Image (cartoon, grey):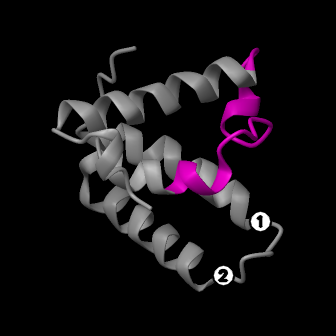
Amino acid sequence: MCIRDSTLYRSEVVIKAIEGALYAVRQAPADHPVLPHVRHLLVFFLVRAERYAEALEQLRHVDGHVGAVPWSYGADPAAEYTVYRALAVAGWEGGGGTPATLPR
C-alpha cells in the first residue's frame, strides 16, 4: 500500500490534532472506554504521517482488537488493521529499528 498523501498528514493542522490526541491518551485513565478507539485512530494518522515508532507504541496497547474505527469502515476490518500494522512495522524497520529496539 502506498500512502500518496503523506504530506497532508504532516501538515500543521494534522500534527496539532495528533499531538492533542497523544496528550489525551497520556492523560486518560487506563480504563477509559474511549481510549482504545483514540489509540486506533492514532495508529491510522501516525502511520500516514510516517511516525512509525509512535504508531507502534499505540499498537502495543490495542494489538489484537480490530473492531474499532477506522478499520470498521472497511469491508474487512481485520485486513484494514493488518495493513496498517504491517506498515508501522515496515516503516520502523526501514528507519533502522529492530525487534530489540521496539518501543515499550
Q: Is residue 62 above or below residue 32?
A: above
Q: Is residue 62 magenta?
A: yes
Q: Which residue is mark 2?
A: 28
Picture quarter containing residue 76? top right
Of all residues, the one furthest to the left in this rendering is: 96
Q: Is residue 15 above or below residue 60?
A: below
Q: Is residue 35 left or right of residue 54?
A: right
- The crowd level at tag 2 (other Cα within 10 Å; few <14, some 14-19, many 20+) is few
Q: Is residue 64 left or right of residue 95?
A: right
Q: Which quadrant is the C terminus positioned in?
A: bottom left
Q: Which quadrant is the N terminus positioned in?
A: top left
Q: Which mark is residue 104?
A: none
Q: Which residue is painted at 27% across and 39% down in the image?
A: 98
- The crowd level at tag 1 (other Cα within 10 Å; few <14, some 14-19, many 20+) is few
Q: Is residue 59 magenta?
A: yes
Q: Is residue 19 above or below residue 11?
A: below
Q: Which residue is painted at 48% across and 78% down in the image?
A: 23
Coordinates of residue 97 in the picture (x, y in percent): 23, 42
Coordinates of residue 67 in the picture (x, y in percent): 80, 37
Q: Is residue 86 left or right of residue 93?
A: right
Coordinates of residue 11 in the picture (x, y in percent): 25, 52
Tag 1: amino acid = Val
Q: Which mark is residue 34?
A: 1
